[in-house]
Image (spheres, rainbow, N blue to C red):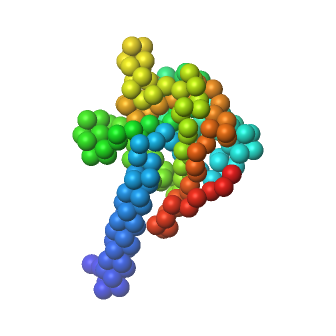
Amino acid sequence: MLTPEEIERAVRREELVGAKAKAKEALAALVSARVRDGVWHTTNTARFQGIVTSGAILPEPLIADGDRWSTSQGKEWYPYVRTLGGVSLFDFSGFEPEEYSKAFPVSSWWEFVPYRSVWNEAVWIEIDADALGPGFISGRALLERWNAGRVGNRIMPQIESAHLGPIPLSSFKSVFVVREGLAALLPINW
């Protein structure tokens, strides 16, 4: 049997969890509104510093596989863009979260918006896709290429786009950071 104090602690913990979930949902709405109709890359602050230091978002940065997205099952399950030697981007042109989730229920876009839970933060980098030239592959074109190749590697249909090769800092249009517990989009000067 639980004591009144244990019940009180459990109730407070549930309230805190609920408040955190509501705050993350509100922040996700802010991020979704900001990134809508743009091409974006997301990372964390430590990795962003590496990007600034190197002068570009690199297709194969010095990040251990254990710290990368979707690498735990081996190369045959790496994200598709990585197998191409590219940088994964989000192409949120015309993105409607509810419609997309119904059409692609297995897609894990929500793991990144507003931030990856393992990071509790995210740096969002807006990319000038026109400045990337022919190395840029739109979300729809990437999905067509993936379907034609009949590969099993992971992809986020239609919203995952790519750039083959490094993305120089000169292709950045804007950068902002979001953090757990902070209901704001903070601009970053790089």
Vertical side of 116 occupied by 18: above or below:
below
- The answer to whether any part of residue 31 appears in the image is yes
Quarter of the image holding residue 65? Answer: top right
**Does residue 16 appear to the left or right of 40 in the view shown?**
left
In this orientation, which residue lies closer to the viewer: 152 or 98? 98
Q: Report the quarter where the N terminus lies.
A: bottom left
Residue reaching furthest right?
Answer: 53
The answer to whether residue 140 is above or below residue 4 is above
Q: Is residue 105 above or below residue 118?
A: above
Name the spot of residue 189 as percent of width and height, x first: 66, 55
134 left or right, relative to 146: right
Quarter of the image holding residue 58?
A: top right
User: x, y (%) of residue 13?
Assistant: 38, 73
Whether residue 78 is visible, yes or no, is: no
**Total label count?**
0
Residue 131 percent coordinates (x, y): 59, 32
The answer to which quarter of the image holds residue 24 is bottom left
Which residue appears at 42% of the width and 29% of the height?
Answer: 139
Q: Which residue is found at the position 63% from the left and 26% from the top?
A: 165
In the rendered structure, the answer to whether residue 72 lies left or right of residue 106 reads right
Tell me which residue sits at (65%, 48%) in the image.
48
Residue farthest to the bottom, as pictured: 4
Residue 186 point in image, percent of width and height: 56, 61
Q: Is residue 151 above or below residue 53?
A: above
- Which residue is painted at 61% across and 42% down in the image? 172
